[in-house]
Image (cartoon, grey):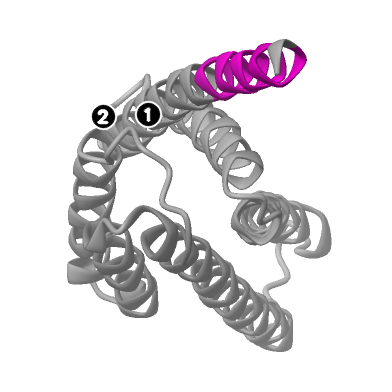
């Protein structure tokens, strides 16, 4: 009987420690996610926008990786990682297109020669490249939406689902100015979702 009581006491102690660790992990992950989302909103600020966005992405990924481990679902982190990798690739492609375009203008065009077919070729290539970038960004937004939808299911915070959906819609509408505004609102909603996430793990989805 004494051994049984000791075993039960040890099990209860381990459960309390595990629960305390889990709550601390949730507290840290929601804090990092909230700060990361706010930093992504601040990408519109001049000079510090790029740095703010990069740090925000890193914090969001760390946060979602922690949530993935807490809820034992790697898809939460994996979808977000794919999303941000596609977004970064799109950014590099934009820089590459701009560089190639200016290089072509300065090297292909002679001092007194202005062939019209050269400009049309560059224009068609640029349009085609931006279509690819646009599609990459939409796919990226879809993966991020999926990640936040999963997180919403586990945490019970519907703002994650709403923010992810708004981000997806905003990305589709990036060809007009309103899309950028919708994306900013989406990150604000996601920041609020992180900060209002309950610090208790739900037992089921």
Magenta-highlighted residues:
3-18
Q: Position of residue 122 (x, y in %)?
A: 69, 76
Name the residue nearer the viewer: 95 or 43.
Answer: 43
CB atoms of marks 1 and 2 within 8 Å: yes
Determine whether the residue tagged by mark 1 lies in a helix, strand or loop. Answer: helix
Task: Say if 121 sits above or below 13 in the image.
Answer: below
Q: Is residue 45 above or below residue 160?
A: above
Query: Which residue, given by chain and number where applicable, does mark 1 sit on?
Result: 49
Q: Could you say which quadrant of the image residue 40 lies in?
A: top left
Left or right, 180 with reference to 2: left
* Relative to 50, 177 lies left or right: left
- Is residue 6 highlighted in magenta? yes
Q: In what quadrant of the picture does the N terminus appear? A: top right
Q: Nearer the viewer, residue 155 or 146?
A: 155
Residue 26 image point, x, y percent: 44, 29
Q: Residue furthest front?
A: 1
* Lateral position of residue 46 relative to residue 33, left or right: left
Residue displayed at 63% across by 55% down: 98
Residue shown at the point (28%, 32%) measured from the top left: 38
Q: Which residue is mark 2?
A: 45
Residue at 75 percent of width and 64 percent of height: 109
Helix, strand, or loop for circle 2? loop
Out of 113 and 174, give the one closest to the viewer: 174
- Is residue 119 on the magenta stretch? no
In terms of depth relative to the viewer, which is nearer, 200 or 137? 200
Q: Position of residue 177 (x, y in %)?
A: 21, 67
Q: Residues within 10 Å of mark 1 (few under 14, many from 20)?
A: some
């Amino acid at each position: 009987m004494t051994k049984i009581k000791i075993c039960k006491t040890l099990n209860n102690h381990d459960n309390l420690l595990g629960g305390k660790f889990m709550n601390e992990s949730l507290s840290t992950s929601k804090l990092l996610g909230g700060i990361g989302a706010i930093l992504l909103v601040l990408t519109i600020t001049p000079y510090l926008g790029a740095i703010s966005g990069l740090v925000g992405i890193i914090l969001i990924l760390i946060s979602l990786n922690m949530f993935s481990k807490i809820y034992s679902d790697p898809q939460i982190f994996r979808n977000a990682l794919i999303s941000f990798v596609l977004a970064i690739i799109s950014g590099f492609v934009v820089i590459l297109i701009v560089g190639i375009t200016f290089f072509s203008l300065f090297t292909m065009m002679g001092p007194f020669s202005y062939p019209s077919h050269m400009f049309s070729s560059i224009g068609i290539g640029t349009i085609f490249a931006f279509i690819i970038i646009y599609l990459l960004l939409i796919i990226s937004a879809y993966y991020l939406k999926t990640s936040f939808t999963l997180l919403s299911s586990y945490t019970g915070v519907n703002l994650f689902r709403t923010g992810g959906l708004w981000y997806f819609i905003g990305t589709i509408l990036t060809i007009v100015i309103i899309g950028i505004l919708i994306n900013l609102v989406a990150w604000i909603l996601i920041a609020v979702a992180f900060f209002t996430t309950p610090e208790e793990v739900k037992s089921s989805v």
